[in-house]
Image (spheres, rainbow, N blue to C red):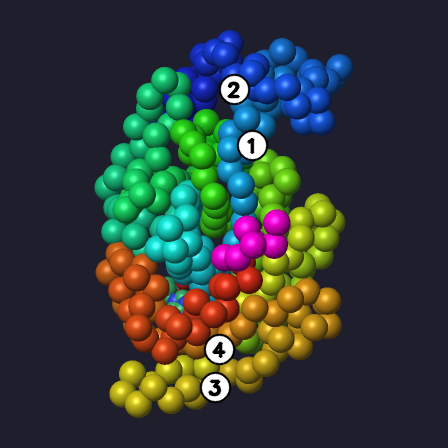
C-alpha cells in the first residue's frame, strides 16, 4: 500500500464527522479554526487532536544516532507495558531503519484500511504500525523526499485506528533533524522522551544534542538510558566494561536530566531481536531482563504520578 494512496484515503474522509463534534472542551487547541488555516487543515488538525485525546501517555524514544539500541528500548518498553496489562500502541517511524517488524516477528504483515483509517497490526493485544509494513521487502530502501516523509509520519499518528490507549511508544528516526522534529511536534502534549545512548564519547556528544533538541521544543526528558554498557559473559554472567562506563550518568547529571540506568551488551538481547520475540518476554527471568525492567520503572509508572 502506497503512502500516497493512504493520503488520498485520508483526504477523502476530511468531511467525515470527527469525535471532536461531540466534545465540549473549549480549552482544546482544536476547538477553533485558526484564521490562517484552510477548512481542510482545520479538519486534519481536529482529527489529529481527537486521535491524541484518546491516548493517555505518549512517549518518544530518541537517540543522537542510529545503532545504539533505540528500537530495542522502544520494543521492550512497549512489551513491558503490554505484559503489565496496559493498552499499548507501538509506532515505528524510523524511516531509514524500520526494524520493529523484525524484532517482533511481524515481517510481511500488511497494514489494512477500513473506514478511511489505517488498521494497526495486533500482537497479543498490542497495536503496531511500522514504516516497514509499507516496504515491499526487507531490503527495500526508503528514498522519499522530505515532505513525503513528514506526511507519512503525520499520517501514521493521525490516520491510524489507535483507539483508546494507555500508552503510545514511538520509535523516532535518530538525530535532531526534520524527521524527529515532525514526530515530536505532531505528538503535541507528549509526556516526554527517553533518550538512548552508548558509552562512547562521541555518542555522549550526540545525546547532548538530543537533550538540547527536547529543550528547544519543550519536550520533557523522561530520562537517559546508556545501552551497550559493558559485556555480559554468556558463560558466567560477569559484566566486562568494553568501553569506559559511566559517561551516560555523568552527562545526564551535567545536563540536569534523569539517568535511568545502564544496559549491558547481552547476546540474548541481540538474539531476541533477531528471533522476533521481545527480549523482556523471551528472557524474562534473566539478570539483564530484570535490570532492564528496573530501568524502565519510572517510565512505566507515569500513571501513578497523575
Ligand atoms: P537503533 O534503533 O538505535 O538503530 P537497534 O535497537 O536496532 O538500534 O539495535 C541495533 C542492534 O543492536 C540490534 O541488532 C539489537 O538487537 C542489538 N542490540 C541493541 N542493544 C543491545 C544490547 N544491550 N546487547 C546486545 N545487542 C543489542
Instruction: Tell me if mark 2 has few (under 14), some (14-19) or many (20+) residues whose alpha carbon lies within 10 angstroms of its own.
Output: few
Residues marked 3 and 2 touching at CB (< 8 Å): no
Q: Nearer the viewer, residue 281 or 85?
A: 85
Residue at 66 percent of width and 77 percent of height: 250
Marks 4 and 2, how far apart at CA: 46 Å
Secondary-structure class at tag 4 = strand
User: In the image, is residue 204 above or below residue 34?
Assistant: below
Task: State the mark number for residue 135.
Answer: none
The image quadrant that residue 223 belongs to is bottom right
Task: Identify residue for label 4.
Answer: 229
Task: Identify residue for label 1.
Answer: 53
**Residue 300 rendering spot, x and y as whole percentages:** 50, 57
Residue at 27 percent of width and 35 percent of height: 110
Q: Earlier in the sequence, mark 3 or mark 1?
A: 1
Secondary-structure class at tag 3 = loop
Task: Identify residue for label 2.
Answer: 19
Label 4 C-beta lies within 8 Å of the nearest ligand 1 atom: yes
Instruction: Tell me if mark 1 has few (under 14), some (14-19) or many (20+) residues whose alpha carbon lies within 10 angstroms of its own.
Output: some
Amino acid at each position: 500500500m502506497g503512502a500516497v494512496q493512504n493520503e488520498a484515503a485520508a483526504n477523502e474522509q476530511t468531511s467525515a464527522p470527527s469525535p471532536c463534534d461531540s466534545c465540549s472542551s473549549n480549552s482544546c487547541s482544536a476547538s477553533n479554526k485558526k484564521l490562517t488555516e484552510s477548512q481542510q487543515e482545520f479538519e486534519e488538525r481536529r482529527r489529529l487532536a481527537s486521535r491524541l485525546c484518546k491516548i493517555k501517555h505518549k512517549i518518544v524514544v530518541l537517540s543522537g544516532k542510529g545503532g545504539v539500541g533505540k528500537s530495542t528500548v522502544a520494543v521492550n518498553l512497549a512489551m513491558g507495558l503490554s505484559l503489565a496489562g496496559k493498552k499499548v500502541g507501538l509506532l515505528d517511524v524510523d524511516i531509514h531503519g524500520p526494524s520493529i517488524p523484525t524484532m517482533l516477528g511481524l515481517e510481511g504483515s500488511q497494514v489494512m484500511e477500513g473506514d478511511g483509517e489505517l488498521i494497526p497490526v495486533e500482537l497479543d493485544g498490542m497495536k503496531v504500525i511500522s514504516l516497514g509494513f509499507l516496504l515491499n521487502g526487507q531490503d527495500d530502501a526508503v528514498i522519499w523526499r522530505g515532505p513525503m516523509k513528514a506526511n507519512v509520519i503525520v499520517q501514521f499518528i493521525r490516520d491510524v485506528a489507535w483507539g483508546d490507549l494507555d500508552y503510545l511508544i514511538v520509535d523516532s528516526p535518530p538525530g535532531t533533524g526534520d524527521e524527529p522534529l515532525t514526530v515530536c511536534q505532531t505528538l503535541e502534549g507528549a509526556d516526554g522522551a527517553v533518550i538512548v545512548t552508548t558509552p562512547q564519547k562521541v555518542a555522549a556528544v550526540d545525546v547532548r544534542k538530543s537533550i538540547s533538541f527536547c529543550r528547544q521544543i519543550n519536550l520533557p526528558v523522561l530520562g537517559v538510558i546508556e545501552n551497550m554498557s559493558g559485556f555480559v559473559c554468556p558463560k558466567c554472567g560477569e559484566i566486562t566494561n568494553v568501553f569506559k562506563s559511566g559517561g551516560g550518568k555523568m552527562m545526564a547529571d551535567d545536563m540536569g536530566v534523569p539517568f535511568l540506568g545502564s544496559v549491558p551488551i547481552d547476546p540474548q538481547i541481540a538474539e531476541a531481536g533477531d528471533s522476533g520475540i521481545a527480549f523482556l518476554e523471551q528472557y524474562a527471568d534473566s539478570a539483564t531482563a530484570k535490570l532492564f525492567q528496573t530501568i524502565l520503572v519510572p517510565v512505566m509508572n507515569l500513571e501513578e504520578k497523575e
